[in-house]
């Protein structure tokens, strides 16, 4: 399909939808300068991520986790929402999209102006930390200056539990509440738009399948083909920002 026709088709599908859900992955945030950890040549192909059981068991693993996180802080702090995030926000603002389900941990959907309640984070959020036991929230700037003094790994002031970024690590259970909300939104949607996910990480990648089996239209916008292209109603192997931006009418 010629490029303009693809955009027209996407616009038409969005206009016809009564209630959409947008599901985002790394591909929307690489356009804001956040690296895709899982991509070929990405950080995780060179340096295995810490498993959650190691984080709990080993002080050295906790130190290494925090060292790596603080090394990434400039990247996360400087990243700003891009045209793709703005297009998603516009769909939410118009009431077209009821929620955003994201695999991203960078908080850029909230930074674009979508309220917390409408962003469902399947893999948590790395822009702040919390106590693993009592969930007291901690800001990274304060943790970082303490860590850089003596590399002591942070513990909770309230209960003594380990403090970790609010992300879901490898080996850590998926967040029950986010998974349930994502399922409810998926089943309520008549249009499910995947933007920038290669749909390889389960259980997250099960949501577009669920939507399709439930009768929703499935649109996949991703630079590379995905395993669900064969069941999708529309597949656009293109950049997210320019594609969604053009279809929604947002710069
Ligand atoms: Zn605590």
Image (spheres, rainbow, N blue to C red):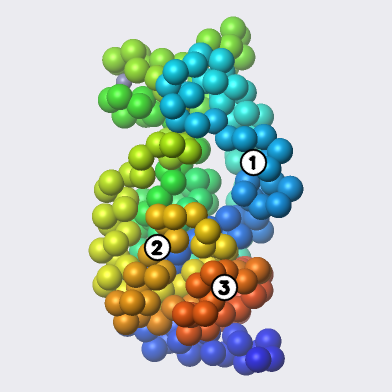
Residue on which the image places disc 1: 44
Question: Which residue sits at x=57%, y=69%?
Answer: 226
At which x and y percent is residue 150? 59, 7
Give the structural element (helix, strand or loop) at label 1.
helix
Q: CA distance from mark 3 to mark 2?
A: 16 Å
Residue sitting at 32 percent across and 50 percent down? 178
Residue at the extreme right of the image, as rendered: 41
Secondary structure under tag 3 reads strand
Given residues 11 and 122, the one toward you in this image is 122
Between label 3 and label 1, give the one nearer the viewer: 1
Few, some or many C-alpha atoms within 10 Å of disc 3 (few <14, some 14-19, many ≥20)? many
Q: Which residue is mark 3?
A: 221
Location of ligand 1 given as a quarter of the image: top left
Q: Nearer the viewer, mark 3 or mark 2?
A: 2
Which residue, given by chain and number where applicable, does mark 2 sit on?
206
Pinpoint residue 155: horizontal percent, then vertical percent: 41, 15
The quadrant where residue 44 appears: top right
Query: Cβ–Cβ below 8 Å for labels 3 and 1?
Result: no
Q: Earlier in the sequence, mark 2 or mark 1?
A: 1
First in sequence, mark 3 or 1: give its number.
1
Q: Nearer the viewer, residue 134 or 248?
A: 134
């Amino acid at each position: 399909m010629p490029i303009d026709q693809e955009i027209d088709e996407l616009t038409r599908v969005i206009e016809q939808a009564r209630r959409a859900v947008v599901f985002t992955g790394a591909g929307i945030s690489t356009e804001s300068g956040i690296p895709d950890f899982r991509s070929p040549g990405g950080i995780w192909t060179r340096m295995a991520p810490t498993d959650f059981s190691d984080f709990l068991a080993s002080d050295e693993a906790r130190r290494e986790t925090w060292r790596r996180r603080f090394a990434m802080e400039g990247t996360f702090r400087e990243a700003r929402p891009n045209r793709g995030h703005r297009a998603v926000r516009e769909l939410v603002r118009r009431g077209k999209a009821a929620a955003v389900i994201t695999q991203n941990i960078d908080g850029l959907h909230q930074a674009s102006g979508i309220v917390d309640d409408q962003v469902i984070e399947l893999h948590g959020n790395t822009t702040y930390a919390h106590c693993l036991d009592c969930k007291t929230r901690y800001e990274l700037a304060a943790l970082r200056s303490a860590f850089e003094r003596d590399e002591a790994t942070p513990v909770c002031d309230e209960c003594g539990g380990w403090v970790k970024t609010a992300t879901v690590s490898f080996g850590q259970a998926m967040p029950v509440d986010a998974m349930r909300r994502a399922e409810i939104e998926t089943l309520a949607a008549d249009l499910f738009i995947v933007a920038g996910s290669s749909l390889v990480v389960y259980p997250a990648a099960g949501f577009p399948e669920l939507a399709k089996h439930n009768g929703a239209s499935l649109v996949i916008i991703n630079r590379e083909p995905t395993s669900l292209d064969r069941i999708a109603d529309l597949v656009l192997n293109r950049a997210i920002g320019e594609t969604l931006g053009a279809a929604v009418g947002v710069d």
